[in-house]
Amino acid sequence: MVRVEKAVTFSIGEKILKIWNMQNNKQKILVVDDDKSILKLLEINLKMEGYGVFTAMDGLEGIEKFRKNKPDLIIVDLKMPVMDGYHFCWNVLYEDGLYVSPTPKIIILSARDEKLDKGISKKIGVSEYIAKPFEMETVINKVKSLLESETMENKKKIIIIDDDPNIAELIMANLPSDKYEYITAFDGIEGSKIIETKKPDLIILDLLMPGKTGYEVCSDIKTNPATQKIPVILLTKKREHKDRYIGTVFLKADEYIPKPFVMDELLKKIEKLIG
């Protein structure tokens, strides 16, 4: 049976710090538009959806706000004084003529629903194009779609292969959902198929399973050039030195944890291997 550490209690100071961190971990949106009414409308509605919002009334001010606040997404009007939307996007997306990474998602707003504008926007790397006048629901849906897809892209994928569903469920319940996505398999054959198709960032693998054992699965992973660099954490009820040796030296697994284990120990090993 897996041991789980006692629940953590927080002091008042720790609770305040936790709330402050939650507020400051909001996804940030920069809105750039010279129309004050549109700017305010977008700001109010985006804040109601839980986003941190910054605003600017021209492209030059937008560049300053972008560099200072590092937003996750930008909504920008095309036609503005001082610096228009195209020049703003170019300054955000490119440095010395090269596409920078990482870059924020960008939604272009324009009073002109023209194919030329859409084509140029797509060519320079803009994510979405919305013609004015627009429905607020359309903007909100586009924002959510872009930011959710970015979040999924950034999540590390973990495959848990264990014939004990209780172990798999316990691990899944403790993996931070904002950092990791997970897939489970309850035998070595199923696990091997998932590894081949999903290409995970890390594999948590039980050694003793019916049918295809963890030894065989690990051997397949580490001898296949396509998967040999994927980190593997072995789980086993055995504590013998020979099992650790076989797992980490002969099979070239990256970590080895005997059962029962403390969940925090597993989470630290995951963090160490894939962040």
Image (cartoon, rainbow, N blue to C red):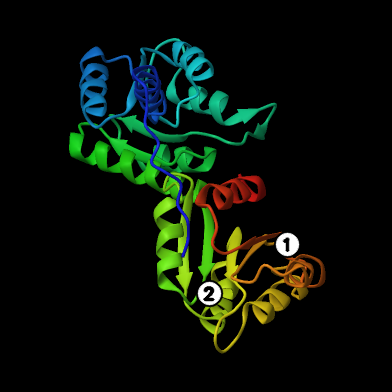
**Depth check: 158 or 47 in front?**
158
Q: Measure the C-alpha gap from mark 1 to mark 2.
A: 16 Å
- The residue under the point 43% across, 24% down is 85
How far from the left and from the top, in percent, is residue 1? Answer: 46, 65
In the picture, the quarter occupied by the C terminus is top right
In the drawing, what numbered circle is on residue 115? none
- Assess disc 2: are there few (<14), some (14-19) or many (≥20) residues with their C-alpha within 10 Å of its C-alpha: some
- Tag count in the figure? 2
**Depth check: 85 or 226 in front?**
226
How far from the left and from the top, in percent, is residue 84? Answer: 44, 19
Tell me which numbered mark, 1 or 2, is placed earlier along the sequence: 2
In the drawing, what numbered circle is on residue 229? 1
- The residue under the point 63% across, 34% down is 100
Q: Residue furthest bottom?
A: 211
Circles 1 and 2 in contact, beta carbons < 8 Å: no
Q: Find numbered disc 1 in the image and state the secondary structure of the residue it sits on.
A: loop
Residue 237 seen from this side: yes
**Depth check: 82 or 198 in front?**
198
The amino acid type of the residue labelled 1 equals: Lys
The amino acid type of the residue labelled 2 equals: Ile
Q: Above or below — where is 274 with respect to 12?
A: below
**Depth check: 7 or 82 in front?**
7
Q: In the image, 121: left or right of 130? A: right
Q: Above or below — where is 250 with respect to 189?
A: above
How far from the left and from the top, in percent, is residue 247? Answer: 73, 69
Question: Based on the displayed image, in which of its 4 quarters is residue 32 positioned?
Answer: top left
Q: Above or below — where is 14 with respect to 180?
A: above
Which residue is under mark 2? 194
- The residue under the point 68% across, 81% down is 216
Q: In the image, 136: left or right of 180? A: left
